[in-house]
Image (spheres, rainbow, N blue to C red):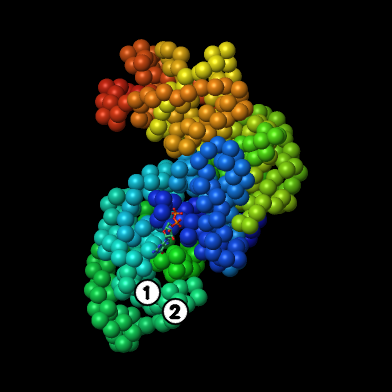
Amino acid sequence: MKRYNEQEIEKRRTFAIISHPDAGKTTITEKLLLFGGAIQQAGEVRARKSARYATSDWMEMEKQRGISVTSSVMKFTYRDFEINLLDTPGHNDFSEDTYRTLTAVDSVLMVIDSVKGVESQTKKLLEVCRLRHTPIMTFINKLDREGREPLDLLDDIENTLKIQCAPMTWPIGMGKRFRGTYHLYTKEITFYDPEADRGVGEVITVKGLDDPRLDELLGSQVDELRADVELLEGAAHPFDQEAYLAGLQTPVFFGSAINTFGVQQLLDSFVDNAPSPLPRETATRTVSPYEEPFTGFTFKIQANMDPAHRDRIAFFRICSGKFVRGMKVKHIRLGREVQIANATIFMAQDRTNVDVAYAGDIIGIHNHGTIKIGDTFTQGEDLKYTGIPNFAPEHFRKVRILNPLKSKALEKGLVQLAEEGTTQVFRPLMGADWIVGAVGMLQFDVVMNRLENEYGVKAVYEPVSYVTARWVTGDRKQLDEFQKKEAMACYTDGEGKLAYLAGSQWRLDNTMENWKDLEFHATREHS
Ligand code: GDP
């Protein structure tokens, strides 16, 4: 049976790049876009990025909003594939949106700096991928520098990230001695030539590692390669597409993004192996991307695109069916029909209005605050997509209002900003001061500036000694007991859900130990 929109859906790849700052995400993005013909020269993505990071004050950030929106989703084509690359802010604009973006993709590309190995932010992002068993492809970057031993890097990934590695290519030397890579499956030697177009010199296919031509080609370095690959045969895992698709194994490529070396190999393997749009869970059933009715969910809200209009843009992942401009859909939370007249599709170059889009695509829907994160739209069926949660904040501040007559406006502002996913708010069961929680520090400034500009509230932050939060659920009686005993650390969040805030990981573990019958959640679904 031919499935609805089969061809359109099968050629789509929707993914994000996870990495620690400075591992090379921007550089790779740029090279991918060059291969996709979406930009004409290296430097374009970087220019946008530096415009974004050069900003320290709010007004500047405001001006740059357009930039962060254009780079939020970059659509490009490669071979016959339609690729949606979703940006995961990672420097000082790291935020809960970074995590939530990972709930909207079908796979990720993990970039590791060969000098540094697995770093903290990568580890956090990988934990988010694990919630949905997201397939992960790995690129070990900066082989033109003296980095750690490749085998040591694979060990690091396996031990720190608890995922099997399946090397696809293997580097021949590194730093000054970097000659290129040997492809373990196609048996191609790809020579590194920083002077050549796209960093790639000759590509020679050999008969395997015993091929005597290798001695000619690589001289003394061939012994090293042979020894490494022999070791790999005992220690590493062969590529297994099923294990990759189940998120249990990551195929690993080596290269040097700045020299474009290894990027095309990676991109080819990505389009060949990464999943096309996958089925998605709702509260009631699994929805296949090949179903005819249009459905999808919002995973990110960007506010004040145009400050004069208080306009918001909701980033919406299509999960099934076909989007056609002007179509009427049901906004499930509000229980009413809405028309999507003004949607944007994100091309790598700029934003254009869309006429049609399919499962896997991201559209931007303009609205005035009627769309929240996690909202589902369908063509009538009552569905609620799950798996687009709030994530436990890692930084906390107490809010002290300076114009107390505005306390209602403060409440409204904090709750609305929480709905947009900017930060989370917590109201104490005892006492009056609101606590703002965030995943990235910049969000605190965003909140203060928006409170003042949009809600007329002047406030300051005061430090507070929390480091983590958990949502607590369980038996009503037990919960009442818990709230009595732990009242000082109990809060309700923007949607009125009970949260426990802890001053240390030890304290949290201890509380969980003492309240074994209650459940402590690091994420919370939107209601
Ligand atoms: P991001 O923070 O992950 O987006 O990283 P960038 O792409 O901005 O790269 C961080 C720094 O590493 C920049 O100075 C890049 O020029 C540099 N870089 C990226 N790829 C390579 C590479 O393959 N080799 C070397 N030596 N430097 C690289």
Q: Is residue 300 left or right of residue 188?
A: right
Relative vertical location of residue 221 with respect to residue 254 in this rendering, above or below: below
For residue 45, which quarter of the picture? bottom right
Q: Is residue 65 left or right of residue 461?
A: right
Residue located at (50% from left, 33% from top): 445
Relative vertical location of residue 326 with respect to residue 515 in this rendering, above or below: below
Q: Please state the total of marks drawn on the protein image.
A: 2
Tag 2 residue: 201
Q: For the N terminus, which image quadrant?
A: bottom right
Determine crowd level at label 2: few under 14, some 14-19, many 20+ residues with C-alpha closer than 10 A: some
Q: Residue 451: x percent and y percent?
A: 57, 26
Determine crowd level at label 1: few under 14, some 14-19, many 20+ residues with C-alpha closer than 10 A: many
Relative vertical location of residue 521 with respect to residue 102 in this rendering, above or below: above
Amino acid at dot 1: Gly
Quarter of image, ligand 1: bottom left
Label 2 CB sits under 8 Å from any ligand 1 atom? no
- 148 or 387: nearer the viewer: 148
Residue 226 seen anywhere in this rendered image of the structure: no
Distance between the alpha carbons at the discs numbered 2 and 1: 9 Å
- 447 or 166: nearer the viewer: 447
Of helix, strand and loop, which one carries label 1?
Answer: strand
Residue located at (40% from left, 56% from top): 23
On residue 190, which mark appears? none
For residue 300, which quarter of the picture? top right
For residue 243, which quarter of the picture? bottom left
Q: Residue 355: x percent and y percent?
A: 73, 51
Amino acid at dot 2: Gly
Relative vertical location of residue 413 with respect to residue 200 in this rendering, above or below: above
Tag 1 residue: 180
Residue 290 seen anywhere in this rendered image of the structure: yes
Q: Residue 476: x percent and y percent?
A: 41, 16
- Asked whether the residues under the numbered discs 2 and 1 touch, taking CB atoms below 8 Å apart as contact, a structural biologist would say yes
